[in-house]
Image: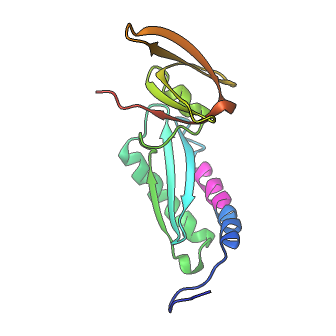
Amino acid sequence: MIQTKGTRYRPLRAFCMANEHVITAIRELAEGLLANDPDNFLVEIRIKPTNNIKLFLDGDKGVPVDKLVSFNRALYPLLEEAALFPNNDFSLEVSSPGLEEPLKLHRQYVKNIGRKVEVTLLDGSSKEGTLQTVTEEGITIEEQIGKKKEKKSTDINFVEIKHTKVCIVF
């Protein structure tokens, strides 16, 4: 093992285990702040090895920037108080997932009914169409097939989906 000056060797497994504990603690703090805000919800938390916390919020009607800023300002002191990082050496970014991020939660699928999506299946194939319905088990998309653009409804179970992204349509 080569260690350069000023760096510390930290096995990946230990980082992942500690990371899960920290993510759980951050999730509890964030969900506590969101308890009185039924329109918005937590999608994901990521922590880089540099202790950069990236927290994604979404909302049934989107999340305005001022809401993200106020959430950041409310969560930051709670993280400092929780002392999850040595010497409170961390940074916090709060944002909405954006179109480049795949849908992760059932609530995000429901929010995007009527929008064009690209669904990548576990077998590597993909389907593109308008998201029509969302159930507990899966989704229905309306595809346009062939040169005549015939419409075909396709049911896809969540267990078959690798990821789903909203398509940008101009």
Q: In the picture shown, does residue 143 fall above or below 138?
A: above
Q: Is residue 101 magenta?
A: no
**Outermost residue, front side:** 147
* Residue in view at x 40 percent, y 31 percent: 167
* Residue in view at x 50 percent, y 90 percent: 6
Colour scheme used in the picture? Answer: rainbow
Quadrant of the frame with the N terminus: bottom right
The residue closer to the viewer here, 7 or 97, is 7
- Measured as percent of width and height from the top left, residue 157 is found at 66, 25
Magenta residues, dominant SS class: helix
Give the image quarter of residue 79. Answer: bottom right
**Outermost residue, bottom side:** 5
* Residue in view at x 66 percent, y 60 percent: 25
Quadrant of the frame with the C terminus: top left
Left or right of 100, for residue 19: right
- Measured as percent of width and height from the top left, residue 93 is found at 45, 59
- Measured as percent of width and height from the top left, residue 56 is found at 50, 49
Q: Is residue 31 magenta?
A: yes
* Residue in view at x 67 percent, y 66 percent: 16
Give the image quarter of residue 3. Answer: bottom right
- Measured as percent of width and height from the top left, residue 142 is found at 50, 15
Give the image quarter of residue 160. Answer: top right
The residue closer to the viewer here, 90 or 34, is 90
What's drawn in magenta, residue-wise?
23-33
The residue closer to the viewer here, 150 or 74, is 150
Left or right of 168, for residue 101: right
